[in-house]
Amino acid sequence: MTMAVNALRTGRLARCLPGCLQAVLGTALLMPAVALAGWDELNMTVGVTDLSAEVHSLHMRIFWICCLIGAGVFGVMIASMFLHRKSRGVKPATFHESTKVEIVWTVVPLLILVAMAIPAAKVLIKMEDFSDSEMSIKVTGYQWRWHYDYLDEGIAFYSALAPEQDLARQRGAEYGLEQFGDAYLRDVDNELVVPTGVKIRFLNTAADVIHSWWVPDLALKKDAIPGFINENWATINEPGVYRGKCAELCGRDHGFMPIVVRAVTPEEFQVWADEQRASAMAAAETQHHPRDLATLMASGEGVYSANCASCHQQEGQGIPGIFPAIAGSDVATGNIEDHVAMVLHGVDGTAMTAWSGALTDAEIASVVTYQRNAFGNEAGDSVQPLDVRAMRSTALNDANELDLGVSR
Amino acid sequence: MSADNAHDGVTHHAPGDHAPEHGHGDHDEHGPASGMMRWITTTNHKDIGSLYLWFSLIMFFIGGAMALVIRAELFQPGIQIVDPMFFNSMTTMHALVMIFGVVMPAFVGLANWMIPMMIGAPDMALPRLNNWSFWIMPFAFAILLSTLFMDSGGPAGGWTLYPPLSLQMGDSFAFVIFAIHFMGISSVMGSINIVATIFNMRAPGVTFMKMPMFVWTWLITAYLLIATIPVLAGAVTMLLTDRYFGTSFFSAAGGGDPVMFQHIFWFFGHPEVYILILPAFGIISSIIPTFARKPLFGYDSMVYATASIAFLSFIVWAHHMFTTGMPLAGSLFFMMSTMLISVPTGVKVFNWVATMWRGAMTFETPMLFAIGFVIMFTIGGLSGLMLAITPADIQYHDTYFVVAHFHYVLVPGAIYSIMAATYYWLPKWTGNMYDETLGKWHFWISTVFVNVLFFPMHFVGLAGMNRRIPDYSLQFADWNMVASIGAFGFGFSQLLFVWIVIKCVRGGKKATAEVWEGARGLEWTVPSPAPYHTFETAPDITKHMVR
């Protein structure tokens, strides 16, 4: 397996070496940025919005300016190191202090900076213009998944690392990472589908800690801060799949909360939106139907893997001192209502967040039942979705009914 | 006036028959105490300087080992070696150890050793405070490092301690805050001592504009420390009360603001960046003229540039926060002020190059490290200029491009300056020349590996690899493997440095008082090794070049 990854990687290295050479040559000849082989592994993406292209061109402009300055400074230094060495028998000059020279090398860089600041300010002003957006999507960061809420379409869902990749990364390299190719750690279970050619406003916020919603191809990166809402916008020009990551350290699984934006034509988007609404309605209708223990256990295992296992671990053993074990815990073997309440409302001041918003009544019923009857726990009892609904506090209930009505 | 006072005090203290030149260590009333107690009770600036430098060297290997854990995990995609939580605490601790335990103590150690000798003073102004500032450090770091062995693990929310994430930590959090307070107290006391020494202890005739650049840069650095460390102390204390006493400074749910922490933190954090580099500028400004055999080009403008950098460092902090959702006016202001800071920094680089120009250079190890510093620090400075462009920064922010940038200014920047300073002054400290051949090997091996380590990080960063992740997608695999090879190469080549230093301490070719042909400054007028007490009578500076 290691051999396979190595072979894969050596192949990649061999492929991109010519790219490096060309990049070096490109630097030497001061060529404008052109599409070079392997370039995408070395440089910023041009992206698929007008703004991302402008950001890219700012990046290239300042890059070449830095290269020129570097070439000048290093050129003089290298020349000096060859010419003015004692071993060549030179006598040191004694000159020092020159106000004229000092003024020149203060003013010239200032002028270069002004030349750079003006286009940068223009792009920045455009980035901050949120007017006339045609669609708003609220993006909420959770440890460790994203929640997307299409404010006008009545669609809302969670999006987390694709389950098979989540399993792979938890089991380690021997699971076979190369089967995923370049998509490893970049696929999600539910993609954010958006229409092309529409000015979309993203409203970023978070439920627990600070996250940052970053999609390089859209040149969007804005922190998602609990209690605050940040704006961002993009008009995507081309249909396609654009991948991103959480960019702000948000705890243990910060590296495992990818973003996938799928841009489709407005017509296709309409079809997708209708399907989403229909399936959400169907799920809402059936979610409070009573289930037997086996059904709850089966669905609970899936909910547990997707939501609980990254902290409490696949076998419920936790991580001593950081994340409590569920196997044999007082909570999972004690009073069932306390157990449900802890899952619903979380534990203040710890990484245990309130799940009342994130999980449906059916999901909470399943996962609580599962925790009480797995990992050697033998509580033997179960809880029904309807019970969970009753146990949500009145205030929370009101808030969540709105939310859950349109959940998957 | 103050210099005269110091002078009186010195002559009073040192009887006339004690010539500062020879054999002072033999007088038992002035020589060091023997055994361990010498180091515990010492108030001698040279002893304390050595303590700081050895402490820093030990921490360098501890922090380095943490970096190697990080690079070992990132050698291949997939999680192979450590849990993501431990990975996060490695990145956090690596930063805290390297910043507060390596670069800052090393600079304070150099200041202790060199500032009194450079300004013709017999010792630091406040010797007991000096002892105390050092001896706080081992305790602070014992506390910090002990958190790794606690049940809840070390701090894992990044060295920036952003809430609410940092508030999710276990109870080792309180120990981390306590350790940071200790480090801060040590730094502030050290800084007060340096300011007091420079203001009061200069030999008669050593005016401000005759002070060596290292003294100037440290004077300004000390002010930065005194101004910013209390801000850090305030920020972490607010975290502490949020965590344990129910306040809500940084919790929106209680009416606070998590972003306010970032503003306060970076109001400390950005001047801190210059605390980590201004003394380096001073070192380089001493070494390049020596080996170019030509006076520093533009001493006055170097002083003004340092002061401008220090001033500007207080008004650029929010460039660390371009993605937090600042008002447009804020983004524009911090973009412009950040770009502006490259002007005085450029002045420094241009002045070093002009000093080299038409000199008669030789390339002993200190000069190699100094030139390495100028080139690689400039690379880091230029990527810093790129990061100042706000719209582009939105793409660079929190990627490996940033990691590459600040490691270029800190490793082949700050660390190289410390290496250069060590090689430069080691003969003065020990009386022996270090092994020049091994020194050159150390430079070249380090320089090759440090670039193999950090240069590819620019690529993966631009291609989209975010920071502080224990696992990554396969398209970043090549360059991460390259960087990890560089990391191990660089890390292990530092053992060579330890060997060279130990070898030099134990013996070697005897050094002359001047040591280097082109050296100027009062430290080169005393014998090598420098006697335990120097300048008990103030030097007659009309006979010597002060800089």
Image (cartoon, coloured by chain):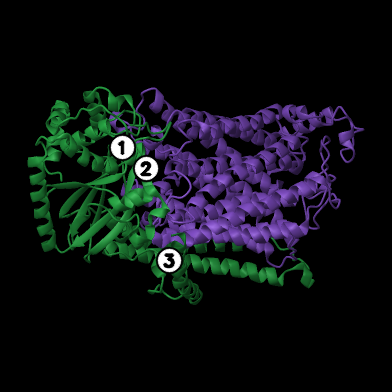
Chain colours: A green, B purple
Q: Do the residues marked 2 and 3 share a common chain?
A: yes
Q: Mark 1 points at which residue?
A: A208
Kindly identify which chain the residue marked by label 3 belongs to: A
Element assignment for label 3: helix
First in sequence: mark 2 or mark 1? 1
First in sequence: mark 3 or mark 1? 3
Using a 10 Å C-alpha cutoff, classify the residue at mark 1 as few (fewer than 14 neighbours), some (14 to 19) or many (20 or more).
Answer: many
Nearer the camera: disc 3 or disc 1:
3
The answer to the question of whether label 2 and label 1 lie on touching residues, with beta carbons closer than 8 A, is yes
The one nearer the camera, B236 or A88, is: B236
Using a 10 Å C-alpha cutoff, classify the residue at mark 3 as few (fewer than 14 neighbours), some (14 to 19) or many (20 or more).
Answer: some
The one nearer the camera, B338 or B276, is: B276
In whole angstroms, how far apart are the C-alphas of marks 2 and 1?
A: 9 Å
Horizontal and vertical percent position of residue B217: 63, 46
Image position of B448 with respect to B537: above or below: below
Q: Name the residue under label 3.
A: A8
Q: Which amino acid does label 1 sit on?
A: Asp
Q: Which amino acid does label 3 sit on?
A: Leu
Residue A298 seen from this side: yes
Q: Mark 2 points at which residue?
A: A250
Q: Quadrant of residue B104?
A: top right
First in sequence: mark 2 or mark 3? 3
In whole angstroms, how far apart are the C-alphas of marks 3 and 1?
A: 39 Å
The answer to the question of whether label 2 and label 3 lie on touching residues, with beta carbons closer than 8 A, is no
